[in-house]
Amino acid sequence: MTTSKDISTHTQPDNNLDNNQNFGVVKENFGEADNQPIYLFTLSNRKGDQVKITNYGGIVTAWISQDKNGNNSSIVIGYQHLDGYLAQTPYFGALIGRFANRIAKGKFSIGKETYSLAVNNGENHLHGGNKGFDKVVWDAEIINNDPPTLLLSYLSKHGEESYPGNLKVTVRYTFTDDNELEIEYNAETDKSTPVNLTNHSYFNLTGDVSNSILNHILMIDADNYTPVDSTSIPTGEIKSVTGTAFDFTKPEKIGTKINEIGGYDHNYVLNNKDNFATPIAILTDDISGRKLEVFTDQPGIQFYSGNFLNGTFKTDDGKAIEKHTALCLETQHFPDSPNQPEFPSVILHPGEKYHTTTKYKLSLQ
Ligand code: BGC
């Protein structure tokens, strides 16, 4: 373990690789939120690729790599200034909790107790409520420079967003020389509570939102998905993807059948054959030649094709972020699990340890 370089006078982070910068983690001031200092951490690997993460919401603000033509660009949507995030975004790059995805009508019971959460998405609860983990200030510690590793910690107090129990959460981001961004989540509670943590990065492998993601090619190793009602709550059924627009068991262009269903915003039931030996999802793009592989130990993944993006949000260089110009691959437990006894349990009890890992690996095809 080596010490970090602190260049906190540098307040204008940019998206260009600095070739003089060695691998490791660099910390910069990024502003202030909730009267606390916010930092931007740049994790650089020996290949010169960089992942930028802020302790506001644990947001991945950029993942900069070379495309097949040697041009640098970020494969995730993000802002170079904190203001963009404070003004609210559709969870660009953020850590999501205490419960990622939806809980029907914001209600669930554990034993004899019923809990009512904020209803912030139609009639349902989404992504932890009004001020989820994406909008809180995390403690941040650079725990290693080789490989660059950042540890974020947060204590979600009993009653925060009406969830029960003091939940101690840590999220460890590691960026390896193989261009793997590994996200390891840990949590412990003192009262039984639902927990479902994920990262909400919006990918466009071309690095340019002028290009639709409908031309990206996707494989998801899932024979089944969880169909939803008109409010996006699972019906409880586990349904085969075979012969439907949901079938990505073989690499398929995202745009091929999207019109049959209007847009993807669905949870896939992962086959999860061999934890981490093979990817559970692969995304490729011919324009950049980039390939993103996803590995996880989670039972599900939400494939969201950016259906609600509508040009309201703009990139730093002023480009409107339109429908289908970015997509999310959110590893998770199934939506509404607290109310669906047939789904794998999401209740963390005192004395238990929540532990899960997801890895995104970037390469050129
Ligand atoms: C949800 C979408 C939602 C998006 C942004 C995704 O995880 O499934 O329905 O619009 O997050 O909030």
Image (tube, rainbow, N blue to C red):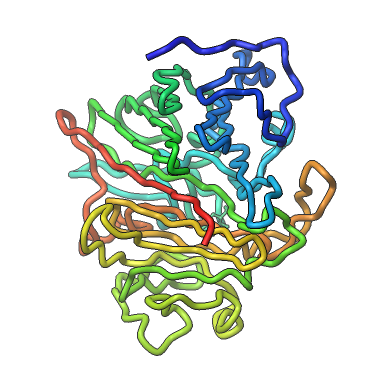
Q: Is residue 273 left or right of residue 260?
A: left
Look at the picture and state if 299 lies above or below 109. Answer: below
Q: Which of 69 and 148 is in front in this view?
A: 69
Q: Is residue 50 visible?
A: no
Q: Position of residue 359 (x, y in %)?
A: 39, 46
Q: Which residue is drawn at 30% across and 56% down?
A: 337
Q: Where is residue 78 in the image (x, y as percent from the top left)?
A: 66, 42
Q: The N terminus is located in which quarter?
A: top left
Q: Position of residue 207 (x, y in %)?
A: 68, 53
Q: In this view, does 237 lie to the left or right of 17?
A: left
Image quarter for ligand 1: bottom right
Q: In this view, does 122 lie to the left or right of 150?
A: right
User: Which residue is most to the bottom?
Assistant: 243
Q: Is residue 127 visible?
A: yes
Q: Residue at x 73, y 31 (%)?
A: 14
Q: Which residue is drawn at 61% across and 50% down?
A: 75
Q: Which of 69 and 130 is in front in this view?
A: 69
